[in-house]
C-alpha cells in the first residue's frame, strides 16, 4: 500500500484530508489508530479545562486548502464580515463547537472511516522500498502522528486529578502548576465558588500563548533551521516553558479572590495550608520527549536515529532523513515534530507536516 498514517487525532485527520485532496484514493491509505473519532482525545481534554473558543491562529482548521477557512464559512453563515475582519488581524477564534462540527465534516467528506484500522502500532521497521508496521504490509510513505506521550503527574500528589481529565470542583482546591492549564483552573474553580491554593515553584511567566509569529514565516523558520543543534534545543526549551497570557481577564478574578481570602499562592504543599481532604488538580501538562512514546523510542533504537536531548532530529520538511529517500518517506507530525516546526503541536503545525508529506506521498503515482 502506498501510504500509512499512525495515530487517530487531529494531526492524523489533517494529514488524511491533505493526501486525499492530493489525489490519493482511500484504498491507498491506511490510518492506524486507537479512536474512531479523531477529535476524541483533544475534545476530552478541552472539555476538562472548559475551553470555549479555539486558541489557534486564524488558519487553525483541518480542511486541506487554506481557503475557505472557518472565518469565511462563519461570515457566509451569519451574513456578517466580522469574522473575516478578525481573521485578517489574526484574532479569529471560532468556538470549540464550531471547530468540532467542522472536524466532523472533514472526517465525513474525506472517507476517513474507509481507511481507519483500529490498531495500536507497536513496531515500525524500514525495509527495502518502505516500512512494515507490526511486521505487516509494505507502506512506501508513513507519517507518525501519535500525539503527546501521556499526562505528566507530579510524584508528590499521587491522588491528584489531572487538569486534562474530566473533573468538577470541590469547595477547596489546590492547583499544582503555573502555566495556561493552571491559570485556567484557578479561574474555573473560583467561578465555581471554590477556595483556591496555587502551588508553584516560581512566579508564572506571562506571554502570549502561541508560538511567536516569526516561527510560522519562511524567514523565521529558515533561521530556526539554520541554528546549531544547541541553539535550536534552547529555543524549543524556552518555548515550552509554562506560561499564560497577560491581561485583566486573567488577573482580575484572581485579585478579587485574593482580597476575599479565596486565593493564595505558595511554593510547596508544606508552605502553609494543610492539604488534607482538599481536591488536588495537577495542571502539569504532558510528559515530554520521544522516550515516553514507546513506538518512537523503539524506532529510534532499532534504526539508531539521530536525536538531541528529548527531540528526534528531523529535516525541515518533518522527515527522518536516515529513513527517507526517493522511494520512501518516514515523517512525523504533532508534538514530536518540533525539531522541524516549533509550533508542531498546533493545528497549523499539523498542517505544516501534512503538506510536506503530501508533496512526497502524492508525487508520482
Ligand atoms: C486542552 C488543549 C487544548 C488545545 N487547544 C488547541 C487549539 O485551540 N488550537 C490549536 O491549534 N491547538 C490546540 N491544542 C494543541 C493540539 O492541537 C492538540 O494537542 C491536538 O490534540 C494534537 O493533535 P495530535 O493528532 O498530534 O494528537 P492527539 O489528538 O492526541 O492524537 C493522537 C492519537 O494517536 C493515537 N496513538 C498514539 N500512539 C499510537 C500508536 N502507537 N498506534 C496508533 N495510534 C496511536 C492516540 O491514542 C490518539 O488517538 C490544544 C491542546 C490541549 C491539550
Image: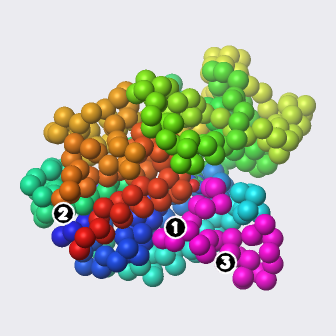
Label 2, residues with CA under 10 Å away: few <14, some 14-19, many ≥20: many
The mark nearer the N terminus, 3 or 1, is: 1
Q: Decide if ligand 1 comes within 8 Å of the CB at mark 2.
A: no
Above or below: residue 159 compared with residue 136: above
Residue name at image x 42 percent, y 55 percent: 353
Secondary structure under the numbered disc 2 in the rendered image: strand
Q: Which residues are magenta?
A: 56-85
The disc at residue 327 is none
Label 1, residues with CA under 10 Å away: few <14, some 14-19, many ≥20: many
Mark 3–mark 2 CB contact (< 8 Å): no
Task: Find disc 1 in the rendering and name its residue.
Answer: 62
Above or below: residue 13 compared with residue 165: below
The mark nearer the N terminus, 2 or 1, is: 1
Residue name at image x 30 percent, y 79 percent: 25
The disc at residue 139 is 2
The disc at residue 73 is 3
Amino acid at each position: 500500500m502506498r501510504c500509512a498514517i499512525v495515530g487517530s487525532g487531529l494531526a492524523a485527520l489533517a494529514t488524511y484530508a491533505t493526501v486525499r485532496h492530493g489525489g490519493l484514493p482511500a484504498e491507498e491509505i491506511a490510518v492506524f489508530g486507537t479512536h474512531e473519532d479523531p477529535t476524541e482525545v483533544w475534545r476530552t481534554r478541552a472539555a476538562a479545562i472548559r475551553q470555549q473558543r479555539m486558541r489557534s491562529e486564524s488558519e487553525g482548521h483541518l480542511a486541506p486548502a487554506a481557503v475557505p477557512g472557518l472565518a469565511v464559512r462563519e461570515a457566509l453563515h451569519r451574513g456578517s464580515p466580522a469574522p473575516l475582519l478578525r481573521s485578517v488581524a489574526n484574532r479569529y477564534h471560532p468556538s470549540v463547537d464550531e471547530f468540532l462540527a467542522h472536524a466532523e465534516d472533514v472526517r465525513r467528506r474525506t472517507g476517513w472511516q474507509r481507511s481507519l484500522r483500529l490498531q495500536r502500532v507497536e513496531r515500525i521497521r524500514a525495509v527495502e522500498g518502505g516500512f512494515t508496521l507490526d511486521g505487516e504490509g509494505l507502506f512506501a510513505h508513513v507519517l507518525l502522528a501519535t500525539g503527546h506521550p501521556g499526562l505528566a503527574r507530579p510524584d508528590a500528589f499521587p491522588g491528584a486529578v489531572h487538569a486534562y481529565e474530566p473533573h468538577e470542583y470541590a469547595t477547596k482546591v489546590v492547583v499544582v502548576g503555573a502555566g495556561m492549564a493552571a491559570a485556567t483552573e484557578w479561574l474555573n474553580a473560583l467561578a465555581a465558588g471554590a477556595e483556591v491554593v496555587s502551588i508553584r515553584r516560581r512566579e508564572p511567566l506571562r506571554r502570549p500563548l502561541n508560538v511567536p509569529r516569526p516561527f510560522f514565516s519562511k524567514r523565521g523558520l529558515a533561521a530556526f533551521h539554520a541554528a546549531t543543534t544547541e541553539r535550536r534545543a534552547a529555543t524549543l526549551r524556552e518555548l515550552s516553558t509554562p506560561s499564560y497570557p497577560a491581561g485583566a481577564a486573567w488577573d482580575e478574578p484572581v485579585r478579587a479572590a485574593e482580597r476575599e481570602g479565596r486565593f493564595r499562592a505558595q511554593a510547596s504543599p508544606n508552605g502553609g495550608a494543610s492539604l488534607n481532604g482538599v481536591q488536588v488538580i495537577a495542571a502539569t501538562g504532558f510528559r515530554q520527549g520521544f522516550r515516553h512514546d514507546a513506538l518512537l523510542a523503539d524506532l529510534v533504537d532499532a534504526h539508531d536515529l539521530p536525536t538531541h536531548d528529548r527531540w528526534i532530529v528531523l529535516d525541515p520538511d518533518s522527515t527522518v532523513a536516515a529513513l527517507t529517500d526517493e522511494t520512501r518517506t518516514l515523517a512525523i507530525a504533532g508534538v514530536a515534530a518540533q525539531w522541524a516546526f516549533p509550533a508542531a503541536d498546533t493545528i497549523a503545525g499539523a498542517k505544516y507536516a501534512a503538506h510536506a508529506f503530501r508533496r512526497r506521498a502524492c508525487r508520482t503515482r
